[in-house]
Amino acid sequence: MKSESIRNWKEWGKKDPYYGVLSEEKFRMHHLSDQSLGEFFETGEFFVSESRKRVLQCFGEDISEGNVLDFGCGVGRLSIPFAKMTEKEVWGIDISEDIIARANDHKQALGLDHLKFTTYNGKELKDLPSFDFVNSYIVFQHIEPKLGMKLMRQLLEHTRDGGIFQVQVTFGHRLPWSAYANFFLRTKFQPYNFLYSSLKHRKFCQEPVMQMNHYSPEKLFRLFSDYSKQVHVELTDHGGHLGAFYLVQKTTSL
């Protein structure tokens, strides 16, 4: 059975691929302009710069010297800046064919021949090389934890020995009760989401809802302990959704 998160993300890929990543009205397809598109990718440039600094500070490694995998790449918001940062091969992977088509359009416009975009089936990561740096940001909260943990292990398997795995995952929230109740009802009850979407857009419609799943830090640390003796953690708060960056330097000599 195909997961609800996969269905929802593919819907966003068809209708609103930029807004599905950054939920600001200026990134809606009907509002998108050259200026807002530039601002969208500027956020990716900042993220990549901060990631490079973070890894250098934590592990003394420069990710610009190795190849990169960006898991849940979307239209290439991070993959493209990664490809500008390094001359080595960069891969972006996503489940949505429509989104990957847009990502390839952006790649071709910039002439980034060492950047490769590809899809996967939502469950298994096949035919991938090993990477010096594996990244996933604001992705796993939209994947059911049971499936997400399996995918995370596969990503760690594709991280080379001595390479860096960086993932951002949510573990809870501090939203007002009314806001969380509304979000919960939209994700669990389609009639409620239909009513909410229709009132919001003033027409009969049902907007796909991106799940916000919480991952157990204990289970994450158990997973990471299979691959490393050290995990660096930085807490995040995205509009009341609480999470953390986890950075792992993989080692086989445990």
Image (cartoon, rainbow, N blue to C red):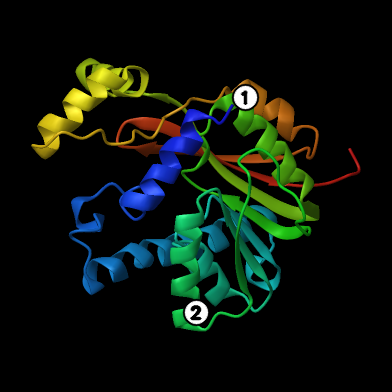
Q: Is residue 10 above or below residue 128?
A: above
On-image quarter of the C terminus? top right
**For residue 125, side relative to residue 32 (left or right):** right
Q: Which residue is mark 1?
A: 146
Q: Against 13, is 196 above or below?
A: above
Mark 2: few/some/many CA within 10 Å (<14, 14-19, 20+): few
Residue 150, above or below 136:
above
Kindly identify the amino acid type of the residue bearing the numbered disc 1.
Lys
Q: Position of residue 85 (x, y in %)?
A: 56, 74
Residue at position x 54%, y 62% in the image: 53
Secondary element under disc 2, as helix, strand or loop, is helix
- Report, in whole angstroms, how far the alpha carbon at label 1 lies from the one at label 2: 36 Å
Residue at the spot of label 2: 108
Q: Please report the residue visible at 20 percent of the width from the left and 17 percent of the height from the top.
A: 178
| Quadrant the N terminus occupies | top right
Mark 1 vs 2, N-terminal side? 2
Q: Residues within 10 Å of mark 1 (few under 14, many from 20)?
A: few
Q: Which mark is residue 6?
A: none
Asked if the residue under mark 2 is in contact with the one under mark 1, i.e. CB atoms within 8 Å, the reply is: no
Nearer the observer, disc 1 or disc 2? 2
Picture quadrant where residue 248 is located:
top right
